[in-house]
Image (tube, helix red, strand yellow):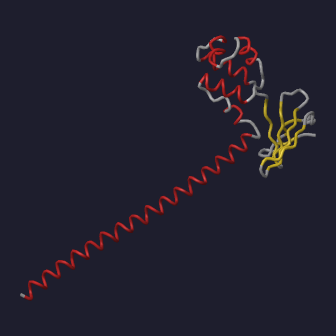
Amino acid sequence: MSYRNNVGGGVLCEEALPVVSYNLLHGTDYVQIYKTPNRKQIIFKINQNIFVKMSLHIGSIIKKIAKKNGYSQGELAEKINAKNAQNVEYDYRQENLPIDKLALYSAALEHNFLQYYYEMEPFKTYRQKELESYLSQIDSLTNQLQELNRLLHAKEETTAYQKHVIETQKELIEKLKGDEQ
């Protein structure tokens, strides 16, 4: 079985053997996850759309960021309250880490390690949907604000006109009083 991408239609993976297959239901989306035999690609099928992800090695990324920030394994182990530097070295070799561990490293290195997963399916699709929803809400609120500003401006104009009418009426009353005398 081969998979075609939903945009260009090109073949993404000639041998899409469902070595591991998970069927998940997320909201209204039906998600199937397959790993290719060489484990180099993970294929996600969300409803009828096909997405391919190359493997992410989060341990290598953490190691790179730690080195960039000048932390030794021992210093980083202290910052995350690990028993010893070997625990950090072990994490560096891991392709995946639990979310609580990612949170520790994110806090210690002041770097969002979850961001790398946002570019992978199915998270990318869900994040895009969230973003579209937020943008729609922003547009709606912007339109409401513009309408309220328009109404406020109209009320200010009405108030200014009413003040002008009142002043004109006062002047007329004073003039009429002066003519009577």
Residue 24 occupies quadrant: top right
Residue drawn at x 90%, y 40% is 2
Residue 162 occupies quadrant: bottom left
In this orientation, which residue lies closer to the viewer: 28 or 13? 28
Answer left or right for 77 relative to 49.
left
Residue drawn at x 82%, y 40% is 44
Query: Residue 98's x, y, as percent?
Result: 75, 28
Residue drawn at x 74%, y 19% is 91
In this orientation, which residue lies closer to the viewer: 79 or 41? 79
In this orientation, which residue lies closer to the viewer: 44 or 100? 100
Query: Residue 156's x, y, as percent?
Result: 35, 66
Q: Is residue 65 above or below residue 159?
A: above
Q: Is residue 66 above or below residue 128?
A: above
Query: Residue 69's x, y, as percent?
Result: 58, 17
**Residue at the outermost left position:** 181
* Quarter the N terminus occupies: top right
Residue 45 occupies quadrant: top right
Residue drawn at x 13%, y 85% is 176
In this orientation, which residue lies closer to the viewer: 175 or 2? 175
* Quarter the C terminus occupies: bottom left
Q: Is residue 160 above or below residue 44?
A: below
Query: Residue 112's x, y, as percent?
Result: 63, 30
Answer left or right for 133 relative to 30.
left
| Tag count | 0
